[in-house]
Amino acid sequence: MQQGLAVPTVTDTVPRPAVPSTATVSAGHPSHPGHPAQGIGPVGSVQPDNYVFSRSPMLVYWETTVACGLACKHCRAFAMPTAGTGELTTEEGLRLLDQITGFEKPYPHIVFTGGDPLRRADLFTLIEGARQRGIGASLAPASTPDLTYDGLVSLKEAGIQTISLSLDGSTADLHDTFRGVPGTFDHTVRAAGWAHELGIPLQVNTLVTDTTLADLPAIYDLMVEMKIMRWSLFFLITMGRGKGMQEITPGESEKLMHWVYNLSKTAPFAIKTTEATHYRRVATKLLHREGVDDATIASMPVGRGFGVRDGNGIIFVSHKGEVNPSGFLPVDVGNVRTESIVDLYRNHPVFTSLRDVDSFKGRCGSCQFAATCGGSRARAYAWTGDYLESDPLCPYVPHENRVRES
């Protein structure tokens, strides 16, 4: 699936561009404005209260199907060529959209993902259903022959505000090895060109692992050529097929965060991290050193992502209707077939604990950046079985007495 994920090492040879007067930095899950249809708010319309999204999530990810024409090494969903059993029907999908309106305006934004949502015969019915209800929608398709120029034209007309594609290598050999199908790299580059031509804002997702890390500078150069809206670095969570892959080390992660921060100042697009919320700590500390005050930081892209994490601003619905805090935190709390997504998000103990940083344990629990960062709850769960534990990818040792910083 494309919700969110999932290197040799980043060394001092990675370019460090000069620092201009302003930064374009972001972290967490997508929060770009896109081009909303009339009467529909942009992505990010839902705002937190002191970094807590208690009324409504910002984003609802719906895994519409596990059917997909690719065979990605890191696939969270164990996607397959054909649809799985028990997938939500068209009627049930429309009822899910009805449920989402129960959050009341501003509604969360829905991301149709998978598998490959293009493999759902009723996709346009569902997109139109979202638009009729005033719900903004984005799409995370797989880059297969199902993704065509004419299809993108129709998707834009139907109301899709943004799309995301994935590139995990700067060359066809590197990328296609991850995706398991020859020709995927070339088709992705073509589709990105179509999106640019059609004026569809495009986010490109890149998996960060021990085997992609050294290629990131070359991938960045490719992103510049592709004229994208946002580059999202998806830090591997070892779940699904990704259990056979290797994360980068905490030290490599910290170096990468500094590289991203410096790069973001000259990049012609936004750069964000997914399942690596500790980028917010790095960016905040560096901005403070440059004399930027908290109010200004809060107004910047990185600040607008403060607090967003699995279960806080994010909710995931599986192809069978199961509700999780995110696609990378597979803790079932209920099913939209029998329960209200609004009630589950607002009141289930899993969600309320994920929104309460005082419930966090270990270093995350004592960290002064707990409210703005919060760590990857998915990685904590993958490593320890406890989603409230510390994020093992973050090397930061917090002050003994926590004083939260904004």
Image (spheres, rainbow, N blue to C red):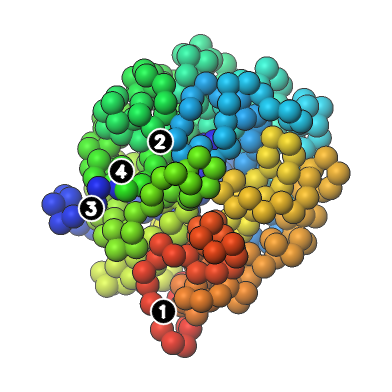
Q: CA distance from mark 4 to mark 1?
A: 30 Å
Q: From the viewer's side, name the closer residue of 168 and 230.
A: 168
Q: Nearer the viewer, mark 4 or mark 3?
A: 4
The residue that appears at 27% across and 72% down in the rendered structure is 289
**SS assignment at label 1:** loop
Which residue matches tag 2?
204
Position of residue 306 measured from the top left corner of the image (x, y, whole percent):
49, 62
The residue that appears at 39% across and 42% down in the rendered structure is 207
Q: Toward which corner of the image does residue 293 lie, by quadrant? A: bottom left
Q: Is the residue marked by circle 2 packed among few (<14), some (14-19), or many (20+) residues within 10 Å?
A: many
Q: Could you tell which of marks 3 and 2 lies nearer the N-terminus?
A: 3
Position of residue 401 relative to residue 140, above or below, is below
Report the amino acid beneath label 2.
Answer: Val
The residue that appears at 71% across and 58% down in the rendered structure is 55
Position of residue 273 relative to residue 288, above or below, is above
Whether residue 369 is visible, yes or no, is yes
Q: CA distance from mark 3 to mark 2?
A: 20 Å
Q: Toward which corner of the image does residue 396 lie, by quadrant? A: bottom left
Q: CA distance from mark 3 to mark 1?
A: 24 Å
Q: Could you tell which of marks 4 and 2 lies nearer the N-terminus?
A: 2
As drawn, which residue projects farthest toward the top? 150
Q: Nearer the viewer, mark 3 or mark 1?
A: 3
